[in-house]
Every structure is written in C-alpha cells, then in structure tokens.
Amino acid sequence: MPYLLDHFDAVKELLALHPFGLFTDVDGTISEIAPSPAEARVSPVCRGSLTALAKHLDLVAAVSGRSAAEAREMVGIDEMVYIGNHGYERWVGGNTELIPGVEDYIIGIKAVIDEFNKRISIEGVVIENKGPTASIHYRRCRDHEAALKAIMAAVEELAEDSNLKIGLGKLVVELRPLLGVSKGTAVVSLIEERSLRGAIYLGDDLTDVDVFVSFHREGLPFKGLAVGIVGEETAPQVVREADCTLNGVTDVERFLRQIVAEVIDRPAA
C-alpha cells in the first residue's frame, strides 16, 4: 500500500481541483486513542493546521462516531463542518440536525442500554448513549477477548429486537439504526451539496472504510483520495480499502502541515 508522504504529488493534483474538501475522522486520526473517550484530546498541531486550512479550502469537515456537538467541542474550530454519530447527524449553525427518521430510534437505544446494564456487569466497560447511536467500550477491561464475547452475547438479541445493527471498532461495539446511513453516505452527500470536484478523507477505523468504499464507486463526479491511518490496532479492511496510508497521528500532523505549506505558505508561481 503506497505511503502517502512518498506520493505527495497525487495530493497536489487534488488540491488543484476546485471546489475541494478535506475530511478527517477524529479519534485515532487527529487524536490519539485514549483509555476512555473523555480522555481523548485533539493534537494541537492538527488543530493548528486545520484552523488555517478551514479559512482557505472550500470545505474542511470532521466526521466522527461521537455526537456532532461533542466533535465540535473537541476539535473547536468554528469554520469546520461536523458530521456526528457515524453520519446520523450534522452540526449546522450552532444546532444539531438529525437524519430524518433517526429520532424514532433514540428511545430504543436507551432501552437496549438499560437492559444491557441489567444483564451484564463487566469491570472496565464504558457505555456512551449518544442518542441515535450507542458505543460500548471495553478498552479498560483486563481480558478484551472475553469482554467482547460477553458484550456480544448480551446485545445481539437486544439489537435485533430494536431494529439496530451492531458494528465493531477499535475495542468498541457500536449500536446504530437500520437506516442505511454511514460515514460514507454522509460524506458523499456533503460532497454533492458543495459540488466538490476533489476530496481527501483521513480515517483509521472500520466505520471509515464506508467512506473509502464510497470513494471508489464508478461514475462519481469528483475525485477522492482515501487515506488509511494505520497503527497496532488497525483492522485489515482499513489498509485493504485505502488508496494510501499514514502511520498514526504523528504522520497526520506532518501531512496536514504539508497541505498548509502547499495551500497557504507557498508563494504563487
């Protein structure tokens, strides 16, 4: 798989397309994975570069499994667009807008989490009820394999009864509505709304693969570059579906700095 920093000419070609958009996942991409979601922090280097780019590129967006409001607070750049809950919501004008129909699942998500808590108690499990979706983190558990087995045994029937789908990420089990919505559909929708001709997406986890696959569909009216951010916990699908890779948040810092140099700092010829 090509290493992106060795092939920056491909990025320059995309940057020459207008309108152009830069999309990035948050946790594991511009923020190191932390023991719990509350402990994660965006890299100051990434934030500085994104702040500059948001003022010069046609679109800069964060795409997260967190709620859109939480992603907005975590990244902290007003000029950016925020897609949250794996595509089920968007932060617009200071308010969260939900995908139509997702409201019907909020009560069901809470009911599943409440029942899950009655059925199982595992030391180290952290549960996030994010409204239209939920995350069950088991990073802090002593035995990750045993924790995952117990979580899945408890939630599979509950999810089916509530018309929810189960997704897996980096030591996390995700519960999401059965609405055909993903980071991929959300990103492509935003690209179409903004009539972008070029786009780059940075992501490290399985939910980001949905964007990578979307970028590779035939007949799209834009040119996209899918960048996999790889590390010790990277799923094989991330590398397989990416066009090129970067090695962790440190490489993302370097990459964003290069884009800043190309777009902003470098004098016109």
Image (cartoon, rainbow, N blue to C red):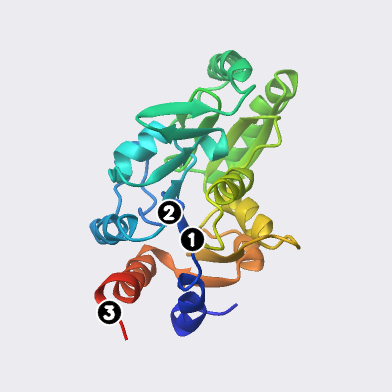
Badge number at residue 266: 3
Badge number at residue 19: 1
Q: Could you say which is closer to the camera, residue 148 or residue 63?
A: 63
Badge number at residue 59: 2
First-in-chain label (2 vs 1): 1
Query: Where, quadrant-wise, is the C terminus in this rendering?
Result: bottom left
* Left or right: 135, with 1 as reference point: left
Residue 23 in percent (x, y) is at 47, 55
First-in-chain label (2 vs 3): 2
* Left or right: 228, with 5 as reference point: right
Which marked residue is nearer to the observer: mark 2 or mark 1?
A: 1
Neighbourhood count class around disc 1 (C-alpha, 10 Å): few under 14, some 14–19, many 20 upward: some
* Left or right: 153, with 39 as reference point: right
Amino acid marked by disc 3: Arg
Neighbourhood count class around disc 2 (C-alpha, 10 Å): few under 14, some 14–19, many 20 upward: many
Asked if 208 appears above or below 83 in the picture, the reply is below
Amino acid marked by disc 1: Pro
Mark 1 element type: loop
Q: What residue is shown at x 56% (from left), y 33% (from top)?
A: 88
Q: Could you say which is closer to the camera, residue 228 or residue 264?
A: 264
